[in-house]
Image: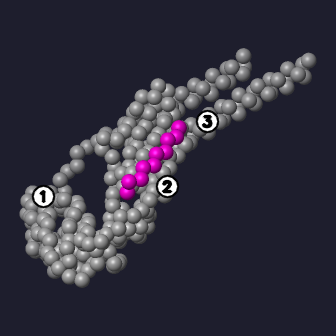
């Protein structure tokens, strides 16, 4: 009876801890409109270029704050430094000449609160450029008077970028492969995530498509799927891209069937696993309970053997 009593005490403590995890919910409040806020649209431009010809596109600068501000516009190289796609707008490569070909209908201006202005981008392509991808980042910077000084000082407080993807017409290569498609078997906390690594060995950007499907282990009911709207990521030439796709609505505890499908350059790979999600503190408690039960059983057996 003492053994059962101790086990009940431990189980009650465990239930109290689990209940406490979900007692409080943080309150959400609407954000106030800031004095200065810069936005642009669209977030990406796609250009089809031909040697010796000119191509144009348009984007909008939007002031969604409560005060007017000055801005400047410039073109910078766009490349990435690693598999996680850390953006680099300083490094020049064979695929970043587009920044040198771009001009704007205006590269500076002033915009009133709750207004927008349209800018025309013109890309003038030299005659002798090779075919393949070309990439730039159009940077829009907000210029404000420096805090505590007169308006002769400039403090660049906000900057947004528009990624510009283009392909120069000619002989292009679309080559690459899926290197990894991984679903972990155990997680300590949500979200439930899967990763994939793809490699583009061609000379033009291509898209990779990711589908995540999650079902309950008990009953098999699908609780999450983005199959109707797959996640798409653009992979630059001569790069590898690591992507993580997640189900943010996962609970803190459960067993699920998780399947990730990756599609890239006509290749499709699928990985499916059982995934157990459990907080690390709960795992320690479960292990402690197991060891306690084993200890109590062994201890009782030893005492029983001595009495005999």
Q: Looking at the rendering, which quadrant does residue 281 occupy?
A: top right
Q: Left or right: 124 with respect to 163?
A: left
Read off the magenta span: 265-274
Looking at the picture, tell me which residue is in the foreground, 203 or 121.
203
Badge 3 crowding class, 10 Å Cα cut-off, few under 14, some 14 to 19, many 20 or more, is some
Residue at horizontal 13%, vertical 62%?
Answer: 60
Farthest residue to the front: give it. 171
Badge 1 crowding class, 10 Å Cα cut-off, few under 14, some 14 to 19, many 20 or more, is some
Number of numbered discs present? Answer: 3
Residue at horizontal 71%, vertical 33%?
Answer: 291
Q: Percent x, y for residue 103? A: 15, 77
Residue at horizontal 88%, vertical 22%?
Answer: 305
Residue at horizontal 20%, vertical 66%?
Answer: 47
Q: Percent x, y for residue 307? A: 90, 19
Q: Percent x, y for residue 183? A: 50, 46
Looking at the picture, tell me which residue is in the foreground, 5 or 186.
186
Residue 161 seen by the camera: no
Magenta region includes residue 295: no
Name the mark on residue 66: 1
Question: Are the two marked residues, 1 and 3, in contact with CB atoms closer than 8 angstroms?
Answer: no
Magenta region includes residue 267: yes
Question: Are the two marked residues, 2 and 1, in contact with CB atoms closer than 8 angstroms?
Answer: no
Name the mark on residue 180: 2
Q: Left or right: 158 with respect to 187?
A: left
Please tell me whether mark 1 or mark 3 is closer to you in this view.
3
Marks 2 and 3, Cα distance to the nearest angstrom? 34 Å
Q: Left or right: 226 with respect to 101?
A: right
Q: Does residue 87 sit above or below 225 in this rendering? A: below
Looking at the picture, tell me which residue is in the foreground, 61 or 114.
61
The residue indicated by pointer 3 is 285
């Amino acid at each position: 009876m003492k053994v059962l009593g101790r086990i009940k005490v431990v189980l009650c403590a465990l239930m109290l801890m689990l209940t406490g995890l979900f007692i409080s919910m943080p309150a959400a409040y609407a954000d106030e409109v800031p004095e200065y806020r810069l936005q642009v649209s669209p977030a990406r431009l796609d250009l089809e270029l031909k040697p010796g010809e000119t191509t144009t596109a348009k984007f909008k600068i939007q002031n969604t704050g409560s005060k007017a501000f000055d801005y400047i516009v410039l073109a910078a190289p766009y490349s990435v430094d690693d598999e996680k796609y850390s953006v680099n707008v300083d490094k020049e490569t064979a695929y970043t000449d587009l920044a040198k070909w771009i001009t704007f209908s205006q590269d500076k201006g002033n915009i009133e609160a709750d207004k927008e202005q349209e800018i025309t981008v013109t890309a003038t392509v030299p005659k002798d450029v090779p075919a393949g991808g070309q990439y730039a980042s159009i940077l829009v910077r907000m210029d404000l008077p420096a805090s505590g000084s007169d308006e002769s000082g400039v403090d660049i407080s906000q900057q947004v970028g528009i990624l510009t993807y283009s392909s120069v017409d000619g002989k292009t290569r679309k080559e690459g492969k899926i290197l990894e498609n991984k679903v972990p078997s155990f997680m300590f906390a949500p979200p439930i995530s899967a990763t994939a690594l793809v490699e583009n060995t061609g000379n033009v950007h291509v898209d990779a498509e990711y589908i995540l499907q999650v079902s309950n282990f008990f009953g098999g009911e699908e609780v999450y799927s983005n199959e109707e709207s797959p996640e798409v990521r653009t992979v630059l030439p001569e790069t590898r891209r690591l992507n993580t796709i997640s189900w943010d609505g996962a609970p803190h505890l459960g067993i699920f069937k998780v399947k990730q499908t990756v599609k890239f350059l006509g290749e499709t790979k699928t990985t499916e696993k059982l995934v157990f999600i459990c907080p690390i503190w709960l795992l320690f408690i479960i292990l402690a309970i197991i060891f306690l039960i084993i200890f109590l059983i062994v201890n009782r057996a030893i005492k029983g053997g001595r009495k005999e």
